[in-house]
Image (cartoon, helix red, strand yellow):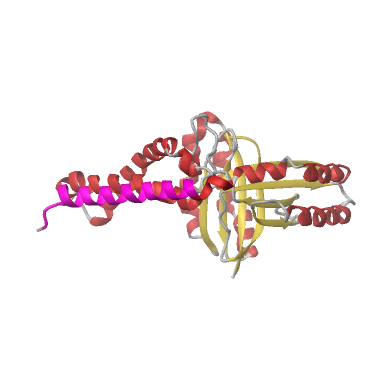
Amino acid sequence: MSTVSIVTQTCVRAESAEAFARWQGETSTAISTFPGFLDQQLIPPNPPLQADWVILQRFATLEDAQRWLASPERHKRLEGAAPMLVGRDDVHVVKDAAGGVKQAPISAVMSTRVRPGKEAEYRAWERKIAVAQTQAPGLQGYRFEPPVPGVQDDYVAILRFDSEANLQAWLDSPERKKLVDEAIPLTEDFHARIARTGFEQWFRDGSGASLNAPAWKMNMLVLLTLYPVVFLWSVYVALPYLSKMSFAHALFVGNIVSVTITGFLVPWAAGRLGWWLKVSPAKDRLRVNLLGTILILALYAVMVFVFWRFFEPVKG
């Protein structure tokens, strides 16, 4: 099934960040019962790479997405958010591949306002750059959408790459810059914004630069830090003090605590395992990957043994 996503990018005043997050939570409740709505993802700012909030809202059909964009419920919500925002919002409607929006570590959303009468020339240029960027290392997907009357006036292109380094390499490449220069006479306005997804904001080196870690390494490190937090919370807090709460409530409280603590532990651990997390030179990659993986697996085994041998809760 081919679904449709609304991609909204908005700049929020620094002093209004918490209020906007609450507002977005209320908006999520309002949209959850709207016909055709499937799911939503909220991506907060990640300076300096991403200064804006990015909201992805997926609908079953284009008509469902358009009805939400034009609905009184949405316009009422937007009126409440207006004092918190700076500048204009970017709202784009894009058709998803089968199964929904494919996630990638980093994406660039580019919107272009084309000069009247230049549409045919711009489409020919777009086909030309589409062919060129298919050769870019790390490209995971590309989507181009023309304007939707009454919804968006811009042409929208979304590039998905496997890493920040590969995306930046394409954006800075002489080939792309030459093609962009060719499009200048055809366009009135152009701007690009970069959005991240997943746990990448946790995986940075001492200077704040991204480690560009592969997803499997990030998952292994998150598990390494999450498991002891969940275990110790369960043994020393949940079982003795929260046993009278319903399972749903106790689990929710535990998740809040676990995610909060893990948010501090993962960056700490990533800073010490940067040699393994980041992509190594080809000649050393196998050795570094094996050493780091064996170390993580050994730590798994030690934790499980210690918790089983010395901290196992007494049953019944």
Viewer-proximal residue among 165 and 79 = 165
Q: At 43% from the left edge and 39% from the top edge, which residue is drawn?
A: 273
Viewer-proximal residue among 113 and 135 = 135
Answer above or below: position of 69 versus 267.
below
Q: Is residue 145 left or right of residue 39?
A: right
Q: In this view, does 57 lie to the left or right of 257?
A: right
Residue 101 occupies which quadrant of the picture?
A: bottom right
Q: Does the magenta stretch include residue 289?
A: yes
From the top left corner, tell me how far across and down residue 294 is, in percent: 38, 50
Residue furthest to the left in view is 316
From the top left corner, tell me how far across and down residue 246 is, in percent: 22, 55
Q: Is residue 305 left or right of residue 84?
A: left
Answer above or below: position of 38 versus 244.
below
Q: What stretch is highlighted in magenta?
A: 287-315
The answer to whether residue 283 is seen in the rendering is yes
Residue 70 occupies which quadrant of the picture?
A: bottom right
Quarter of the figure with the N terminus: bottom right
Q: At 11% from the left edge and 53% from the top edge, which residue is drawn?
A: 314
Q: At 52% from the left edge and 62% from the top edge, which residue is drawn?
A: 38
Dominant secondary structure of the residues highlighted in magenta in the image: helix
From the top left corner, tell me how far across and down residue 36 is, in percent: 55, 64
Quarter of the figure with the C terminus: bottom left
Answer above or below: position of 207 versus 98.
above
Answer above or below: position of 17 versus 106.
above
From the top left corner, tell me how far across and down residue 76 is, in percent: 56, 47
Residue 131 occupies which quadrant of the picture?
A: bottom right
Q: Does the magenta stretch include residue 259?
A: no
